[in-house]
Amino acid sequence: MENRSLVTIAEHSKEKILYLLEMAKQFEKNPNRKILDGKVVATLFFEPSTRTRLSFETAVNRLGGRIIGFSDAATTSSSKGESLKDTIMMVSNYADLIVMRHYLEGAARYASEVAPVPIINAGDGANQHPSQTMLDLYTIYQTQGTLENLNIFLVGDLKYGRTVHSLLMAMRHFNPTFHFIAPEELKMPEEYKIYCRQHGIKYIEHTDFTEETIGDADILYMTRVQRERFTDLMEYERVKDVYILRNKMLEHTRPNLRILHPLPRVNEIAYDVDSNEKAYYFQQARNGLFARQAIICDVLGITLDEIKE
Ligand code: CP
C-alpha cells in the first residue's frame, strides 16, 4: 500500500506544494466540512506544543473527525519503558492517522516505516517541521502574492530551528535568495548549506542584525533560540538575546515586508512590533488550521475535487 505519510517537505514536488496550498485556500473559505466523519486521528506529542497540536486538533474537529492522543508522554506507558515502535503499533490499532511530535531526529521517519497508518511529522528534534512549512508557504503567498524570487531573511537559531530547515528545502522550487542571520554558535548547519548549493539556492550569511542588513527583505522570519536543544545552558544564556527585532528597525524596510515567526516567541520580537502592519505572525499561526486541514485530507487520500464547493 502507498505510504502517504508526511515526514519531510523535501519529498514534495512543486506541483504537490501548490496543490496543497490550493486545498488550504478552500479550507480558509470554509473550514467546517464533515468530511472526516467516522475517522479517528491520534495526536502523540512527546514534546510540548501549543499551536501545532491545537491547530491539528481543531482541524480534525472542524472536519467532523474524532481525536485521541496525549500531550504529555509522562502519562503514557512510554514512561514505563514501552518502545516507540510498540506505541505506534498500538495506536495504529485505534486511529486512521497519527500526528506525532518527538524529540528525536528521525523519529517520524522511523514511525512511518513501522506504522500501518499514515504519519504526519509534527516536528522531530532539530530536524524537520513540514506542516509548519506548509502554513509558512501559505502565509508567504498570501502576503506577497507569489512564492517566486523573494528575499527571505532567516534570523536567530538556524542550527536547532527545525522550521527554517524545512522552509529552505521547500523554497528550492521558487528561486529564493536567503539571508541567514545567526551568531557563530547558531549558524545554519553545513548539511543545509550543501543542500542549498546542490539545488541552486542562493544564500548569504550574516552575523549582524541591523536596520541596514534587513533593508531589502520581503520576508523576515524570526526564530526563538531553542533552549531545549542545548546541552550547555551557559551557552544558551550567552546567545539567548542575541537578536531582538524592535519597531524602530522597520522604518526603512520595504512596504511589502512581512514579519513571520513560527512562535512561541520569547524575547526576539519586542512587543512594540506587534502593532506594526508588517507584523504577521499571529495571522500566520491562524493559517496553520487551513494548511493542516489540507495535509490531513491529503494523507487520508481525500482530493481537492472532493473538497471544492
Ligand atoms: N510553531 C510551533 O511548532 O509551535 P508549537 O511548538 O506551539 O506547536
Image (cartoon, rainbow, N blue to C red):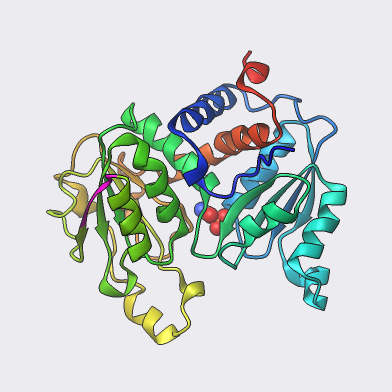
Within the displayed image, which quadrant is ligand 1 positioned in?
A: bottom right
Q: Residue at x 40, y 86 (%)?
A: 234
Closer to the camera in the image, 58 or 92? 92
Instruction: Identify whether 171 is placed above or below 110.
Output: above
Residue 92 in picture, x, y percent from top left: 82, 50
Residue 296 in picture, x, y percent from top left: 66, 37
Residue 128 in picture, x, y percent from top left: 50, 55
| Magenta region includes residue 201 | yes
Q: Residue at x 74, y 66 (%)?
A: 84
Closer to the camera in the image, 136 or 187? 187
Q: Quadrant of residue 140?
A: top left
Instruction: Identify whether 77 is placed above or below 249.
Output: below
Query: In this image, 166 relative to 98: left or right?
Result: left
Instruction: Identify whether 215 is placed above or below 111.
Output: above
The magenta segment is 200-204
Query: In this image, 173 relative to 122: left or right?
Result: left
| Magenta region includes residue 100 | no
Q: Quadrant of residue 164?
A: bottom left
Residue 204 in picture, x, y percent from top left: 20, 55
